[in-house]
Amino acid sequence: MVQSPNLLPTAELQARDAAHHMHPFTHGAELGKKGARIITSADGCWLTDSDGNRILDAMAGLWCVNIGYGRQELVDAAARQMQELPFYNTFFQTTHVPVIELAERLAQLAPGDLNHVFFASSGSEANDTNLRMVRTYWEMKGQPSKKAIISRWNAYHGSSVGSGSLGGMKGMHAQGGMPIPDIHHIDQPNWWSEGGDMTPEEFGIERAQQLEAKIKELGADNVAAFIAEPVQGAGGVIVPPDSYWPEIQRICDKYDILLIADEVICGFGRTGNWFGSQTMNIKPHIMTIAKGLSSGYLPIGGSIVCDEVAEVIGSGEFNHGYTYSGHPVACAVALENLRLLEEEQIIDTVRTETAPYLKEKFESLTDHPMVGEAKIVGMMGSIALTPDKATRAAFASEAGTVGYICRERCFSNNLIMRHVGDRMIISPPLVISKGEIDTLIERALLSLDEAMAEVEKQGLM
Ligand code: PMP
């Protein structure tokens, strides 16, 4: 951890930030009043801010720092590659060693015949690739009417016009002319909020069968693909009922619909296996990857594509690509990250030791009077805040009010948890230790107590 000795006062940095920096997913006026939190360094699972606070990062940045902060090996890999070849493109029949090695490594790690990689710099870009690739695939196969892509409300697939359209965030669709045509959404498998009187298993089937109904409505000849996160992340870590994915898989197979698994969060160990598709036992034709691929140290993403789709796409020219597709430095860092994940058996440790330990502790949060369900797979989990567990009631206040109060209490207790509506979510670095898990749970409980006191004071429950 390197803390700058010349750090300027927090208030001055905040004022300069507010004057010139436009933040993603941030209410500008509110930020101007409050000032941004300034993170200055990090190590393992811990952040340091400009006031010297040590903060436990239970979100791994934005779900991405799987290997933890401060790994010198990744710094060295980047420096070596920058000296040797800082950039060359992969267009027009050109390649370089880091991209060759990374594509090969990903083909080894990915399940089944997912053997080909198209690189991008982010999850959004990769999903834009997927959108064009699946439509182009069907066109090249002589079925140009297969254009529609089915996704889910409250899914998150990125923030570009294409990937934001694939996502099902209504607040995003409301800004800037989304969704683009021929993207359709079905309901999400969120039993806690939407399951009514059904059992989780009944509800999982009901939600999966919405896919079949949508395919019939559009006509299977018009549907190119279904896209989904194995476990919804930004939508609030919604773990589907066990009945859900087998039924989705059955439907995709029956109607000859390509299945795209968006592994941007679930990939690279987050669910206790290399990919969420393995944990959920699904067989996608394409997997979207980003985030944990480089543990966030450099921007890189991509699409891992099955033999059949890659063969068809490769039979002609796919007029698509990004300047930084297969950026050599990002590839070198990703390769080193994958090497460390494997050699240090980080994912095995998650699956066999730390995730089961976290699960037990995390599920015990339901003993708290304001916590309804706790759902967790590997190292991604969420709790539903509620005024009444028995009826799974929502708070009378606008959705997110109580979640925001709770998140602010976490921040003041030096714990980063995020809120999605009135769900609180975690996604810590995979290297989190049992001792750090204890700290996480202690701070979460303290924050829940404080939040509940505030919620009662404001008459919200
Ligand atoms: N897909 C999923 C499932 C994601 O969670 C995200 C980002 N949170 C994206 C795509 C978009 O990735 P990026 O922000 O790198 O464009």
Image (tube, rainbow, N blue to C red):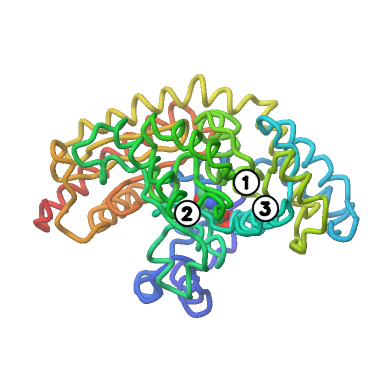
* Amino acid type assigned to the residue bearing label 2 in the image: Tyr
Q: Judging from the image, what secondary structure is the residue with disc 3 in?
A: helix
Please give the label number shown on residue 138.
3
**How would you rate the neighbour count of disc 1 (Cα within 10 Å): few for under 14, some for 14-19, many for 20 or more?**
many
Viewed as shown, does residue 264 lie left or right of 83?
A: left
Residue at screen point 63% across, 41% down: 285
Residue closer to the observer: 412 or 454: 454
Front residue of 55 and 127: 127
Give how far across and how far down residue 265 sits, in percent. 53, 44
Q: Secondary structure at mark 2?
A: loop
Residue drawn 35% across and 42% down?
207
Residue 150 makes an appearance in the image: yes
Q: Which numbered dot is residue 156?
A: 2
Q: Nearer the viewer, residue 65 or 93?
A: 93
Q: Classify residue 360 by image quadrant.
A: top left
State yes or no: Cβ of the residue under disc 2 lies below 8 Å from any atom of ligand 1: yes
The single residue placed furthest to the top in the displayed view is: 352
Under mark 1, the amino acid is: Ile
Disc 3 versus disc 1: distance between alpha carbons? 22 Å
Residue pointed to by mark 1: 289
Tell me, yes or no, whether the two marked residues, 2 and 3, touch with CB atoms within 8 Å. no
> Which residue is depicted at the point 41% across and 42% down?
426
Q: Residues within 10 Å of mark 2 (few under 14, many from 20)?
A: many
